[in-house]
Image: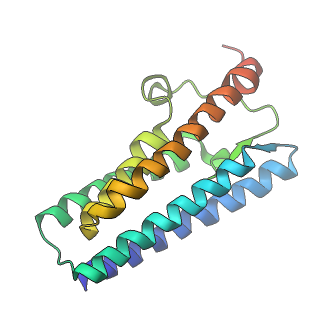
């Protein structure tokens, strides 16, 4: 039962951040920003939801109980959400979205985290969150089958984001 409650809380937290994303998206579009990678965003959304439900389904079928593996998973999830909070509220503020949005006159953020990790939202939030969720739920099948699919879609997003950075955002910035 503990695992199910935790998954529900984690999913609710994701919805809170989705609301922030939607608000930021509306402001970006209202101010002349544009979206890139629409098809990939849809694929990421499907993959994310499928991963969550698959992990939960595995927990239900296996009647998983909270143990040391679950605790490690929860620790990863807490780390992932702390990173997401930091990224959303301190590094990207009003321009963070789950979509690949480029604000009008979007400037590159030279924060050290972007220089050394480059894509902290993906490497320090999404990947640890999903691995943590699989560990929390003891979802080995989801981790082995869905995670590689998710990673393919995510790496396509990263390539798209790198292209937008190189062609639009960095040229827009003055260092």
Do we see residue 99 in this rendering?
Answer: no
Q: Residue 160 is drawn in which quadrant?
A: top right
In which quadrant will I find the C terminus?
Answer: top right
Q: Image check: 157 left or right of 53? A: right
Question: How many numbered callouts?
Answer: 0
Residue 136, x across and y down, in percent: 26, 66
Do we see residue 97 in this rendering?
Answer: yes
Residue at the spot 74% in from the left edge and 49% down from the top edge:
38
Residue 163 or residue 125, whichever sits in front:
163
Residue at the spot 23% in from the left edge and 67% down from the top edge:
138
Q: Is residue 24 above or below residue 32?
A: below
Residue at the spot 53% in from the left edge and 59% down from the top edge:
47
Residue 119, x across and y down, in percent: 50, 35
Q: Residue 77 is drawn in which quadrant?
A: bottom left
Residue 72, x across and y down, in percent: 19, 58
In which quadrant will I find the N terminus?
Answer: bottom left
Residue most extreme to the top: 175
Q: Image check: 13 left or right of 94? A: left
Residue at the spot 63% in from the left edge and 66% down from the top edge:
19
Residue 76, x across and y down, in percent: 28, 54
Q: Image check: 146 left or right of 19? A: left
Residue 69 or residue 142, whichever sits in front:
142
Residue most extreme to the bottom: 1
Q: Is residue 123 above or below residue 52?
A: above
């Amino acid at each position: 039962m503990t695992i199910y409650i935790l998954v529900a809380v984690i999913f609710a937290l994701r919805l809170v951040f989705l609301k922030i994303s939607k608000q930021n998206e509306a402001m970006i579009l209202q101010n002349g920003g544009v979206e890139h990678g629409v098809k990939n965003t849809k694929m990421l959304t499907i993959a994310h939801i499928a991963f969550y439900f698959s992990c939960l389904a595995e927990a239900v079928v296996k009647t998983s109980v909270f143990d040391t593996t679950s605790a490690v998973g929860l620790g990863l999830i807490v780390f992932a959400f702390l990173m997401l909070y930091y990224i959303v509220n301190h590094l990207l503020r009003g321009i963070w979205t789950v979509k690949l949005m480029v604000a009008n006159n979007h400037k590159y953020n030279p924060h050290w985290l972007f220089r050394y990790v480059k894509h902290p939202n993906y490497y320090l939030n999404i990947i640890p969150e999903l691995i943590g969720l699989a560990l929390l739920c003891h979802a080995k099948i989801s981790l082995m089958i869905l995670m590689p699919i998710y990673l393919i879609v995510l790496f396509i997003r990263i390539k798209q984001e790198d292209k937008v950075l190189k062609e639009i955002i960095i040229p827009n910035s003055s260092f």
